[in-house]
Amino acid sequence: MRAASTEPRLKLYDPENRVTEAPRMKRVRLKQIINVLAEAAKSDRTWLSDFADDEIKISADLYEVLSLYRRLRPSA
């Protein structure tokens, strides 16, 4: 017999008043989420900080580009 998981599960609100459990992991293309993340960061949305310590998996190429961009961009 398998023990029940005590890990909290995220519940998503559906405008049609249905509650669904969020999947553990989901594969998406960057273009599907980049605009939402950019707007949330620009608007300083609180929910974005809830995920600040979550790890994400990105390609080595994207990591290199982001690292270089971070080093080269002018500081404010």
Image (spheres, rainbow, N blue to C red):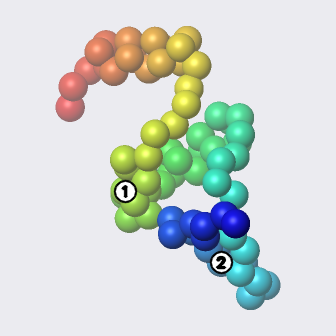
Q: Quadrant of residue 75?
A: top left
Q: With respect to residue 32, does 13 lie above or below?
A: below
Q: Is residue 72 visible?
A: yes
Q: Which residue is mark 2?
A: 13
Badge 1, how many Cα within 10 Å: few under 14, some, many 20+?
few
Task: Pick whichever, 74 or 8, lies toward us.
Answer: 8
What's under tag 2, amino acid-wise? Tyr
Q: How many marks?
A: 2
Residue 70 x %, y % = 33, 21
From this view, report whether residue 44 is shown above or below residue 57. Answer: below
Relative to 35, does residue 23 appear above or below in the rendering?
below
Q: Residue furthest bottom?
A: 17
Q: For the residues marked 1 and 2, what is the alpha-carbon distance in whole angstroms?
A: 19 Å
x%, y% of residue 38? Answer: 50, 45
Q: Secondary structure at mark 2?
A: strand
Q: Residue at x 37, y 47 (%)?
A: 53
On the image, numbered disc 1 is attached to which residue? 49
Residue 4: numbered disc = none
At a point 38% along the width and 12% down the height, the residue shown is 68
Does the rendering let one see residue 45? no
Where is residue 55 drawn, in percent x and y?
Answer: 46, 39
Task: Relative to 32, say whether 1 is above or below.
Answer: below
Disc 1 marks a residue whose amino acid type is Ser
Say which element carries label 1: helix
- Badge 2 density bin: few <14, some 14–19, many ≥20, Cα 10 Å: few
Q: Name the outermost residue toward the left.
A: 76
Which of the 4 image quadrants contains residue 14? bottom right
Contact? badges 1 and 2 (CB < 8 Å) = no
